[in-house]
Image: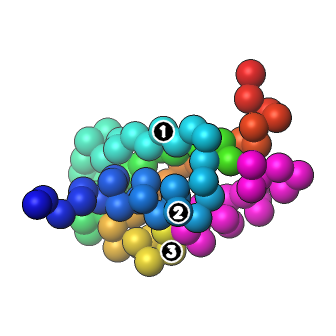
Amino acid sequence: MNAPTRAERIEQKLQAALQPTLLELTDESALHAGHAGAASGGSHFRLKIVSAKFESLRLVMRHRLVYDSVHDMMHSEIHALAITALAPSEQP
């Protein structure tokens, strides 16, 4: 059995903590080749996530919930995380 990839581990943590109805995680590390974060081994990710847990929360609190979910990976395995966090009521 293969060990989960970095992206799979991020997705597992977010699923467990936020029970999203939509989770799209894109590894954009290749776009940042040569960047200091890439040199240290940290990856660049873009995340779109929809969760009922974001309902009535301000953007900064939504981001805090996401960062809290992956805190043990920040600054070592994740160098940058661009987040779009929506409540179900905000989806088009």
Label 3 packing within 10 angstroms: few (<14), some (14-19), many (20+): some
Q: Identify whether 73 is placed above or below 1.
A: below
Q: Amino acid at mark 2?
A: Ala
The Cα–Cα distance between marks 2 and 1, rounded to whole angstroms, is 15 Å
In this view, the residue in front, 82 or 39, is 82
Read off the residue under disc 3: 71
Q: Which mark is residue 16?
A: 2
Q: Amino acid at mark 1?
A: Glu
92 relative position to 73: left or right: right
Depth check, mark 2 against mark 3: the one in front is: 2
Sequence-earlier tag: 1 or 3:
1
Start and end of the magenta stretch? Answer: 52-69
Residue 24 pos. (x, y %): 48, 38
41 relative position to 80: left or right: left
The image quadrant of residue 4 is: bottom left
Queried whether the magenta region covers residue 42, the answer comes back as no
Indicate the secondary structure of the residue bearing disc 3. helix
Q: Amino acid at mark 3?
A: His
37 relative position to 20: left or right: left
Read off the residue under disc 1: 24
